[in-house]
Amino acid sequence: MSDRQLEYFRQKLLGWKEDILRESRETLSHLQSETENHADVADRASSETDRALELRTRDRQRKLISKIDEALRRIEDRSYGYCEETGEPIGVARLEARPIATLSLEAQERHERRERVHRDD
């Protein structure tokens, strides 16, 4: 992968990470400001459900940040854009769609087929 492509993906990953961190700060601010007590049990349940969903979403995004950080490390050591399983280049279109991809499309499909087979056991 060329230096220009690596820099493009580095900027894309950094922007994505910053967006996630900004959303997390907004969520934290929102959760801190929403400490009101609801007199109605249904309102309280609805509020708790919304809060739980928001926290689950933030947890998933926390895991995504670690994957973004891993991709940034791969850019630094110049292993970014190569399949971890085969060593072959990952297509630019796949990286554009999923910049944290570690497997080529073919390797990912094989991995998913194996998961389905073992899940059915």
Image (tube, grey):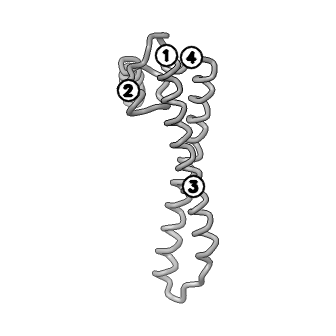
Residue 98 location (% of width, % of height) = 42, 33
Compared to 87, does 8 lie above or below?
below
Compared to 19, does 108 lie above or below?
above
Which residue sits at x=59%, y=46%?
Answer: 62
Q: Please name the amino acid that badge 4 sits on.
A: Ser
Sequence-first tag of 3 and 4: 3
Residue carrying label 2:
94
As drawn, the residue found furthest toward the top would be: 87
Are there few (<14), some (14-19), or many (20+) residues within 10 Å of tag 3? Answer: few
For residue 2, the mark is 1
Sequence-first tag of 2 and 4: 4
Label 4: which secondary element: loop
Q: Please name the amino acid that badge 1 sits on.
A: Ser
Q: CA distance from mark 1 to mark 2?
A: 16 Å
Foreground disc of the pair 4, 1: 1
Residue 86 location (% of width, % of height) = 47, 10
Residue carrying label 3:
22
Residue carrying label 4:
79
Q: CA distance from mark 3 to mark 4?
A: 28 Å
Q: Please name the amino acid that badge 3 sits on.
A: Arg
Which residue sits at x=36%, y=22%?
Answer: 109
Q: Nearer the viewer, residue 104 or 117?
A: 104
Sequence-first tag of 3 and 2: 3
Which residue sits at x=58%, y=41%?
Answer: 65
Foreground disc of the pair 1, 2: 1
For residue 116, the mark is none
